[in-house]
Image (cartoon, grey):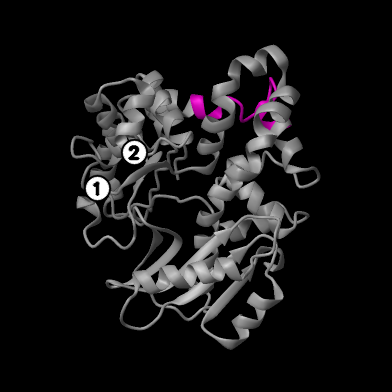
Amino acid sequence: MLDEFPYLCISNRALPSILQRLWDERGLHSNVCLVLCGSYVSFMEREVLAHQSPLYGRRTGQLLLEPLSFGTLREFFPRYGPVDRVRAHAVLGGVPAYLTQFSDATSLEKNIETAVLGPTAPLREEVRFILTEELRDPKQYLSVLEAIAFGRTRLNEIVQHTTLDRGPVSKYLAVLQELRIVERDVPVTEPAPHKSRKGIYRISDSFFRFWFRFVNPHRSELADRGPSHVLKTNILPHLEPFIGQAFEYTCREILRDRVLTGRLAVEYDRLGGHWDPTMEVDLVAMRGRAPVLMGECKWSRKAVGEDVLAGLRSKAARLCPSGPAPLLVLFSRSGFTSAVSRQEREGELLLVDVRLLE
């Protein structure tokens, strides 16, 4: 196994051709399994997988390593409760290199200050370093990513925020999607997602979203006034709403895990959200063209009450005017009122209290 293969190739540009010759002459008919690993996606796709690569056509398999799931955070932060693990997941996502920089011996806020904002913090320049390695001219890409981080998620909104022309912005977005830094999200209810005009852009990685929302815009303040000031003034007033926006994606992971482990008997083809000019639904599971599950995710310090449940039922009736009614699911940071809890025992309703997660 050759780890960080891109660095080896930078030190010796002929390495892919050397490996090609060795593999063709000796490796192909041996009992050797050769594994090439690299953390720079664009390089691996260009120098190992692409048609012009000397190694093209010789691979017997490929694997794109995804971030770890939310459930694995128990092993990184065993002293955190479920709510704090959700908060950490919103900031760090599931990349082990980021997770190991935080400690559950202290609060999430203190971890942000020491591991992200400090002058020698290991994660302070992480995103900029990655983009510099992946992209030839990262300046314009930084502008596009910051626009998305601040809620400019449609193409025309990104164009207005960056003051760049529409053509270049489309090109930058295409490159960022190829690198899996940005993804185009479409309502899961759309029958032809690739043709849909309802698509919005979002930053795929949680820590990238956090960095572009809270670190990059305040770099000068970090240098002039220090980490404590930026944390108190620019991050803490907005941290819980930021976590709330990420909460629905954590809820999707929780739902997938319950289905995969057999704790929830729901069969679906696609899982995502729904939005149109009249309503939004945080979580919808589709089988074919029919919703089989609909849910809302509430990151609030108040228990979820009957008003939220009534709203979800109304949306379900509008989205599913005929056919079987979907299973309704409510996710809550702070539990549910007794009236809502009583209805779970009486009908097709699932309640997930984050505080009680294993």
How far across and how far down the image is residue 147, in percent? Answer: 43, 30
Please name whichever residue, 325 or 102, is drawn nearer the observer in this view of the structure.
Answer: 325
> Which image quarter holds the N terminus?
top left
Please name whichever residue, 277 or 95, is drawn nearer the observer in this view of the structure.
Answer: 277
Q: Residue furthest bottom?
A: 346
How far across and how far down the image is residue 89, in percent? Answer: 61, 49
Mark 2 secondary-structure assignment: loop
User: Is 202 drawn above or below residue 78 in the view shown?
Assistant: above
Question: Viewed as shown, does residue 283 lie left or right of 164?
Answer: right
User: Is 68 drawn above or below residue 21 in the view shown?
Assistant: below
Of the numbered discs in the image, which one, if any, rests on residue 282?
A: none
How far across and how far down the image is residue 248, in percent? Answer: 52, 56
User: Is 7 drawn above or below residue 74 in the view shown?
Assistant: above
Q: Is residue 267 visible?
A: yes
Q: Is residue 358 visible?
A: no
Residue that numbered label 2 is attached to: 154
Question: Viewed as shown, does residue 342 lie left or right of 203?
Answer: right
Mark 2 closeness class: few <14, some 14–19, many ≥20 residues within 10 Å: some
Q: Earlier in the sequence, mark 1 or mark 2?
A: 2
- What is the spatial separation of the Cα atoms under label 1 and label 2, in whole angstroms? 10 Å
**Could you say which quadrant of the image residue 284 lies in?**
bottom left
Residue that numbered label 1 is attached to: 197
> What's the residue type where badge 2 is placed?
Arg
> Which image quarter holds the C terminus?
bottom right
Q: Is residue 353 magenta?
A: no
Question: Viewed as shown, does residue 151 lie left or right of 190?
Answer: right
Magenta range:
114-128
> What's the residue type where badge 1 is placed?
Arg
* Residue visible at 41% across and 24% down in the picture: 143
* Residue visible at 46% across and 29% down in the picture: 146
How far across and how far down the image is residue 245, in percent? Answer: 54, 48
* Residue visible at 73% across and 38% down in the picture: 109
